[in-house]
Image (tube, rainbow, N blue to C red):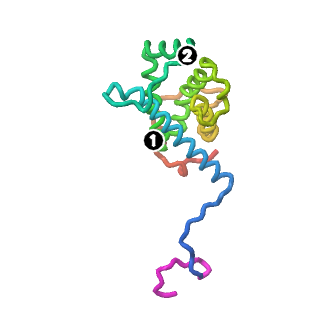
Amino acid sequence: MKGSTQPVAHDGKVADDRVTIALDRATLWTGIGTLMRLFLGGWMIVSGYSHWAPSFGLMPGFPQPLGTLPLSSQMLVSMIEVGMFDMVKTVEIIGGLCLIFGVFVPAAVLLLLPVSAIVFYNAIFLNLRTDRLFNPTYMGVMCLYMNVILALAYVRYYVPMLSLRSSPGSLRDLLLLGRVFRRDDQLPRG
C-alpha cells in the first residue's frame, strides 16, 4: 500500500478512520454525569442571570417567582431583604460557570448543594408541590437530584476530607495549592 493516504492497521489491512466508543457502564456513567453537569450548570447560570439582569438594564431569562404560598413568599422576601438572595444568585452563577467549563467541578457541586436543597425545600414543602416530587421536568426538584448524583459521581474527591481525627497544618501546606492545576491523570489514585 505504498503511497496510500489511508491509515493502516497493525495487521496490515486498511484501517477505518472512524472513532469507536465502547458503550459500557463507565462510558454511560460519564456521559450521564457530563449531561447533568452541563444542564445543572446552565440552569444555575440562567437562574442567577435572571436575578442580576435587571440591575444592568437587561431582560431576565424569567421573572423571579416569590412563592405561591405565604411561607414560601415569607422565606424568599426575607432572603431578599437581608441580602442573602444576592449571595445565593452569585453562588449560582459562579457554580454554574464552573460546571459548564468543567473547572473546580467537585468544589462547585458542593457549593451548589445548599442552594439546590433550599430550592427543593421551597418547591416541595413551602409551596406544597409534593405531586412534583418525581417530575423530571420540574427544576424545583431536579436541581437537587442532579446535584446529589453529581456529588456521588465525584465522591473520590470528598473521601480524603473525611478524616476521623485531624490536626491543623502549617502555612507550608499552602504549597499544596500547586497541585490544583495538575490534570486528573497526574494525581495518584487511592
Front one among 38 and 3: 38
Residue numbers of the magenta segment: 1-12
The amino acid type found where label 1 is placed reads: Gly
Residue at label 1? 178
Residue at label 2? 72
- Quadrant assignment, res 46: top left
Looking at the picture, how far across and down is residue 74, in whole percent? 52, 12
For disc 1, the neighbor class at 10 Å (few under 14, some 14 to 19, many from 20) is few
For disc 2, the neighbor class at 10 Å (few under 14, some 14 to 19, many from 20) is many
Foreground mark, 2 or 1, reads: 2
The amino acid type found where label 2 is placed reads: Ser
Query: Mark 1 or mark 2, which is nearer the start of the sequence?
Result: 2
C-alpha gap between disc 2 and disc 1: 44 Å
Front one among 184 and 114: 114
159 to 26, vertically: above or below: above
Which structural element holds mark 1?
A: helix
Residue 174 falls inside the magenta stretch:
no
Which is the main secondary structure of the residues drawn in magenta? loop
At horizontal 55% and vertical 47% (from top left) the residue drawn is: 187
